[in-house]
Image (spheres, rainbow, N blue to C red):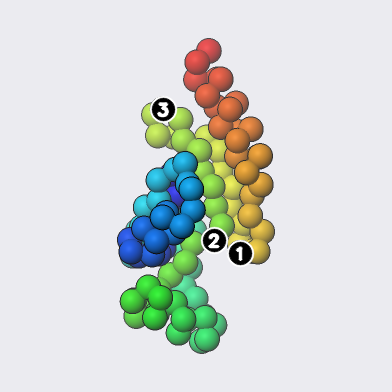
Amino acid sequence: MAICPDTVALLQGARSEASLSYDLYSDLPMKAGSAFGIAYRVKDPGYLKMLKQRLGSDDPMLPVPSAFLLDAEGTIVFSYVNPDHKVRIPAAVILSAATHLARSEHE
């Protein structure tokens, strides 16, 4: 699954445009992002204005690029957080970590 700061309407549009094999969830108030410690307030005035219009929020927040894998008990067993929004974790790394997690849970 993916948790995004976008509105439900924006996520539904993205889901219909792309063939996604996972669920998208809206975290517009950034409660999940804040709980994970990855939410931040945008300072750039131009970007802030665009976000306010896009998200319909007077105080929009964004998450830093992150990925988390949880075990069956809900414990985070893998995390990736990078404050540089231009750097994303390669899908192959997440897949490898998830495969390792699945194997270890079946042992």
* Secondary structure of the residue carrying numbered label 3: loop
* Residue 48 percent coordinates (x, y): 47, 81
Mark 3 → mark 1, Cα distance in angstroms: 29 Å
Q: Quadrant of residue 95?
A: top right
* Residue 1 percent coordinates (x, y): 43, 44
Residue labelled with disc 3: 72
Q: Amino acid at mark 1?
A: His
* Secondary structure of the residue carrying numbered label 2: loop
Mark 2 → mark 3, Cα distance in angstroms: 25 Å
Q: Amino acid at mark 2?
A: Val
Return the residue nearer the eye: 4 or 70. 4
Give neighbour class at mark 3: few <14, some 14-19, many 20+ (Cα, 10 Å): few
Q: Residue at x 54, y 61 (%)?
A: 64
Q: Quadrant of residue 60?
A: bottom left
Contact? badges 2 and 3 (CB < 8 Å): no
Residue labelled with disc 2: 64
Return the residue nearer the eye: 27 or 9. 9
Residue labelled with disc 1: 85
Return the residue nearer the eye: 21 or 6. 21
Mark 1 or 2, nearer chain start: 2
Mark 1 → mark 2, Cα distance in angstroms: 6 Å
Contact? badges 1 and 2 (CB < 8 Å): yes
* Residue 70 percent coordinates (x, y): 46, 35
Q: Residue at x 56, y 32 (%)?
A: 98
Give neighbour class at mark 2: few <14, some 14-19, many 20+ (Cα, 10 Å): some
Is the residue 23 above or below the residue 55 in the image? above
- Residue 101 as seen in the image, left or right of residue 84: left
Q: Residue at x 33, y 76 (%)?
A: 56
* Secondary structure of the residue carrying numbered label 1: loop
Number of disc labels: 3
* Residue 78 percent coordinates (x, y): 56, 38
Contact? badges 3 and 1 (CB < 8 Å): no
